Amino acid sequence: MSDIYSLNDPARRSEGFAAAKLALSRSGLVVVPTDTVYGVAADAFDPAGVRRLLRAKGRSRAKPAPVLIGSPDTLRALATNLSAEVRELAEDFWPGGLTLICRQQPSLRWDLGDSRATVAIRMPDQEELLALLDDTGPLAVSSANLTGQPPATTAADAQDQLGEAIDVYLDAGPTPGATASTIVDATGDALTVVREGVVTLEQLRQHIADIGLAGSD
């Protein structure tokens, strides 16, 4: 049975981080807490791990895995053609619940799914996860639930859905809520909100007045 490590216990935290890093180095999967909902993580640069992630969720390659990073500086290493508006949103809302879809650096050798040379990037506002990202580097992370099922707000919720498909569960207690991140597509001529989440359209427009909403006229 997959192990659950309580990050609120210093000894188990240390053991959990060691187990998580070992699993990730072996194309394994780790359930992690975030500032939105629990996520299932793989090494972003390990195609076998990312394939396992997509299979565990029942997610097709048509929906590539987003990437979580531990520092805003990593955005420039992973993405190209970043406009002043994109950099402003990252500065204002990271760490936090905003995902930015950007053009990926052409030199990157990874396989997140059928991404069409784009990558969805976020820096989460969760202390334990940021500590893990500092050790592991970018992680491919999708919500820790089966496709079509409610997102997991506890490690136990995630285990109920994903079970033995996951190698290590890191438990930091309940997440702040059940709402996922807001997603902004920055790959076109204008910024567009393609999923509304914890960051509201009103909040975004306080910074970028002409940001659009997908599906609206």
Image (cartoon, rainbow, N blue to C red):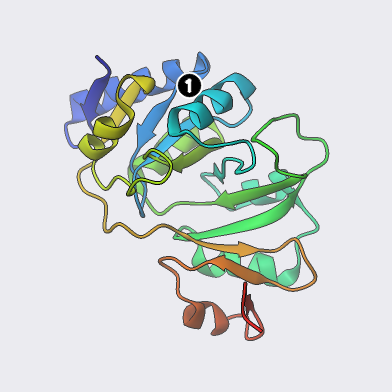
Q: Residue at x 76, y 34 (%)?
A: 108
Quadrant of the image occupied by residue 60: top right
Give 152 or 27, whichever is nearer the viewer. 152
Q: Residue at x 39, y 28 (%)?
A: 30
Q: Residue furthest left?
A: 9
Name the quarter where the N terminus is drawn: top left
Image height of 31 relative to 122, above or below: above
Image height of 31 relative to 190, above or below: above
Name the quarter where the C terminus is drawn: bottom right
Residue 210 position within the rendered picture, expressed as x and y whole percent measured from the top left? 67, 84
Residue 43 position within the rendered picture, expressed as x and y whole percent measured from the top left? 55, 28
* Label 1: which secondary element: helix
Q: What type is the residue that disc 1 sits on?
A: Leu
Give 45 or 87, whichever is nearer the viewer. 45
Q: Residue at x 52, y 17 (%)?
A: 27
Residue 64 position within the rendered picture, expressed as x and y whole percent measured from the top left? 61, 41
Give 52 or 91, whichever is nearer the viewer. 52
**Would you name the residue on which mark 1 appears?**
24
Instruction: State how many labels appear.
Output: 1
Q: Residue at x 36, y 54 (%)?
A: 36
37 sits to left or right of 188: left
181 sits to left or right of 114: left
Residue 212 position within the rendered picture, expressed as x and y whole percent measured from the top left? 64, 78
Quadrant of the image occupied by residue 13: top left
